[in-house]
Amino acid sequence: MFEIVENTVGAITNHSLYLNGTGRFTGDIYANNGYFNGEINSISGVIGGFTIGENSIISTDGNLKLFSSDGTGNSKIEVRNIDIGDGAEVSGSIRIGNLSLLNPSTYNGNVLTLIKKE
């Protein structure tokens, strides 16, 4: 079903739909290609090998996971086989098991610290 929402001018010609204005489709849309300008909103779906969740984007192989905190302050990135490359900066610290790699300007000149596990 296609619904005309506002002063819409459109036409269906030669197997094509032309729309100038705002329209609403209900149901599924299938296409070979799509080009969008503006904003796309979704709380679920799959795009290019990534599954979109309400607060996450996860690669289909599970090697890259991005989680938004949704206001809780617990955002995180999970990555397998990470290559940081040149120019990477640590603004606070990176924890590796019982060891933390520290930014010396943030931690009084300390670079490494051993954390006692409780």
Image: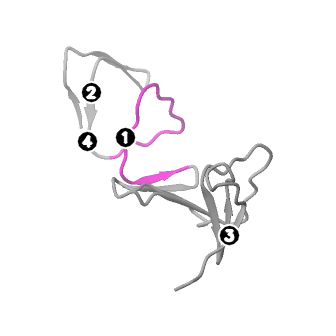
Circles 4, 2 touching at the beta carbon (< 8 Å): no
Residue behind mark 4: 26
Q: How far apart are marks 4 and 3 (CA)?
A: 57 Å
Tell which circle, 1 or 2, labels the residue nearer the N-terminal end: 2
Give the residue type at disc 3.
Thr
User: What span is in magenta?
Assistant: 28-47
Indicate the quadrant where residue 7 lies. Answer: top left
Label 4 crowding class (10 Å Cα cut-off): few <14, some 14-19, many 20+? few
- For marks 3 and 2, give the CA distance: 59 Å
Pointer 1 or 4: first along the chain: 4
Can residue 42 be found in the magenta stretch? yes
Dot 3: what SS? strand
What distance separates the C-alpha of mark 1 from that of mark 2?
16 Å
Front disc: 1 or 2: 1
Tag in front: 4 or 3: 3
The answer to which of marks 3 and 2 sits earlier in the sequence is: 2
Q: Among all residues in the image, which is located at the extreme front?
A: 108
Residue 20 in percent (x, y) is at: 33, 15
Marks 3 and 2 in Cβ contact (< 8 Å): no
The amino acid on which the numbered mark 2 sits, given as a three-letter code, is: Gly
Where, by quadrant of the figure, is residue 69 drawn? bottom left
- Earlier sequence position, callout 4 versus callout 3: 4
Q: Point out which mark residue 113 bears.
A: 3
Q: Residue at x 46, y 25 (%)?
A: 37
Of residue 62 and residue 80, the one placed in the foreground of this image is: 80
**Label 1 residue SS:** loop
Q: Name the residue under label 1.
A: 41
Q: What's the distance in space between the residues labelled 4 and 2, CA to CA?
A: 10 Å
